């Protein structure tokens, strides 16, 4: 209960009846709560089914502490240019913290009623090498997971829970990854099989034969919830919600329809596109949306812009991003059937400009070493192979190289969040930053590093000499 002007404010509580759990979700962040959890709730309303969600936070107890007193429920506020829509989301039934009680999480995943384990654990949560997509056996969490039955990593939980199901004669669950990785189903299948082989080859063979890992493309812009958002929600609903989410109206979910025994919520009834192959959708979204998001994050941050909407209100960045789409990204893509990429770019432009969405450049700039390969380097590779220069994307990579030094162009400190932050900083502050960063093989494959070197050196020098905005202006 919180007190404002002497009046007690009640805590938000569950109003809908509990639903039996059919999905365990690993990584209960704002994105899943504003995307998958809403679709699944709508699918249950449309067609029924026991698809209640048990949320799992792998490390921190914050989300559990915030949601448990609210019966797992929370408010979602859709922020459209023309108005707002409020929703009380009640599909999450309970929350566990894996670090506190890994056995309870494994038991939940091995429950016969659970047919899907979905994930939003961010790119780094797969413990893979971003440049190759293979499990990094030297990752400290994987080393630990090989040594103990009680896992710490997402691949570790998947493998140990699948082992329990196999031992109990149950079918495996479908692993439904919802992270922004290309061929995300293949990536998670690969890391699970690599780890399972090291644990027990017969388990690996069973997973290979029986397991399902559909790839998905997920999309909705959901900035991290800020303290002022919590206060705003309290004013709006007259009750206290410790963990509301704020999101744009747009949403898209494209899912390969390949589930164990065909068991899934009726996602098709609520607008999810169920397809045979998601690859072209994933490339389009990762390169057109996430690629320009990352470009705007680094170049926008270095231009002094706090949010993506601020970037779009700056004519220099606005024309820069439009040029990126039309000249550098679209020419390197194959559109999904029936999709016009120029229209997709136009829609992205409108979404970015939505002033109600305060999506920080600093937030998107996080974990660049895990994001650049699939968001930007793939497009560069395709273009360079065809002899097409990419001045805009070069500037984006060069801006990242400056950003990870930990000081902006005016010498102000930057708080760089990245699993490789210390190594990035060492390389970026060495006498030859471009060369040292390009030699990081977990980000840049050798051949690509060689082709990128000369144009990147030029872009890097231009940013240092002229600053971000003038350099973008000159590149347009
Ligand atoms: C963003 C994504 O933070 C980021 O890196 O690019 O979270 C982006 O907002 C979503 O993928 C949109 O669907």
Image (tube, rainbow, N blue to C red):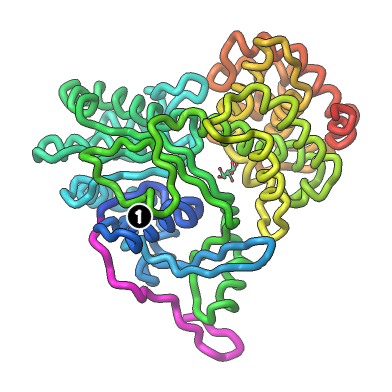
Quadrant of the image for the C terminus?
top right
Element at label 1: strand
> Which residue does the image show at 56% across and 68% down from the upper left?
85
Q: Relative to the observer, which residue lies in front, 404 or 339?
A: 339
Give percent across and percent down for residue 369.
Answer: 58, 29
Q: Relative to the observer, which residue lies in front, 411 or 386?
A: 386
Give percent across and percent down for residue 78.
Answer: 57, 63
What secondary structure prevails in the magenta region?
loop
Count the marks: 1
> Which residue does the image show at 59% across and 22% down from the upper left?
378
Q: Is mark 1 within 8 Å of ligand 1?
A: no
> Which residue does the image show at 77% across and 27% down from the upper left?
392
Residue 328 belongs to magenta span: no
Q: Quadrant of residue 463?
A: top right
Q: Which residues are magenta?
A: 1-21
- Visible residue check, residue 420: no
Q: Could you tell whether 136 is left or right of 348 in the image?
A: left
- Visible residue check, residue 368: yes
Q: Residue furthest front?
A: 338
Give percent across and percent down for residue 375.
Answer: 60, 30
Q: Quadrant of residue 302?
A: top right
Q: Relative to the observer, which residue lies in front, 164 or 474?
A: 474
Q: Is residue 430 above or below residue 353?
A: above
> Which residue does the image show at 75% across and 36% down from the upper left?
321
Q: Could you tell whether 238 is left or right of 45 in the image?
A: right
Q: Is residue 467 above or below residue 103?
A: above
Q: Which residue is mark 1?
A: 55
Q: Could you tell whether 364 is left or right of 61 in the image?
A: right
Question: In which quadrant of this rendering is ligand 1 seen?
Answer: top right
């Amino acid at each position: 209960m919180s007190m404002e002007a002497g009046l007690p404010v009640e805590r938000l509580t569950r109003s809908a009846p509990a639903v039996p759990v059919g999905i365990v979700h690993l990584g209960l962040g704002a994105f899943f709560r504003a995307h998958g959890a809403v679709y699944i709730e709508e699918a249950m309303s449309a067609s029924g089914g026991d698809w209640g969600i048990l949320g799992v936070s792998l490390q921190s107890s914050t989300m559990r502490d915030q949601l448990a007193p609210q019966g797992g429920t929370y408010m979602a506020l859709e922020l459209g240019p023309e108005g707002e829509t409020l929703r009380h989301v009640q599909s999450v039934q309970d929350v566990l913290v894996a670090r506190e009680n890994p056995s309870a999480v494994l038991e939940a995943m091995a429950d016969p009623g659970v047919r899907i384990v979905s994930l939003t654990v961010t790119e780094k949560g797969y413990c893979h090498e971003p440049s190759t997509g293979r499990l990094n056996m030297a990752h400290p969490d994987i080393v630990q997971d090989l040594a103990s039955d009680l896992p710490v990593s997402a691949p570790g939980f998947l493998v140990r829970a699948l082992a329990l199901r196999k031992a109990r004669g149950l079918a495996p669950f479908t692993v439904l990854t919802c992270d922004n990785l290309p061929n995300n189903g293949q990536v998670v299948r690969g890391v699970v099989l690599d780890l399972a082989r090291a644990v027990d080859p017969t388990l690996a063979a069973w997973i290979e034969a029986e397991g399902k890992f559909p790839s998905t493309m997920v999309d909705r812009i959901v900035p991290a919830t800020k303290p002022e958002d919590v206060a705003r929600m309290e004013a709006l609903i007259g009750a206290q919600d410790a963990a509301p989410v704020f999101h744009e109206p747009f949403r898209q979910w494209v899912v390969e329809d390949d589930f164990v025994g065909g068991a899934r919520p009726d996602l098709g009834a609520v607008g999810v596109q169920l397809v045979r192959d998601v690859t072209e959708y994933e490339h389009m979204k990762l390169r057109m949306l996430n690629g320009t998001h990352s470009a705007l994050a680094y170049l926008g941050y270095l231009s002094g812009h706090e949010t993506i909407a601020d970037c779009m209100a700056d004519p220099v960045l606005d024309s820069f991003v439009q040029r990126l789409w039309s000249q550098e990204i679209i020419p390197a893509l194959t559109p999904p059937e029936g999709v016009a990429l120029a229209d997709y770019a136009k829609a992205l432009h409108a979404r970015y400009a939505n002033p109600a969405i305060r999506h920080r450049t600093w937030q998107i700039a996080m974990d660049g070493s895990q994001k650049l390969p699939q968001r930007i380097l793939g497009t560069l590779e395709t273009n360079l192979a065809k002899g097409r220069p990419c001045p805009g994307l070069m500037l984006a990579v060069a801006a990242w190289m400056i950003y990870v030094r930990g000081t902006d162009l005016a010498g102000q400190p930057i708080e760089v969040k990245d699993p490789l932050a210390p190594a990035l900083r060492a390389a970026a502050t060495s006498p030859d930053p471009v060369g040292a960063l390009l030699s990081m093989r977990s980000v840049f494959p050798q051949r690509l590093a060689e082709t990128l070197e000369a144009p990147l050196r030029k872009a890097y020098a231009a940013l240092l000499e002229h600053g971000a905005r003038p350099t973008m202006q000159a590149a347009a």
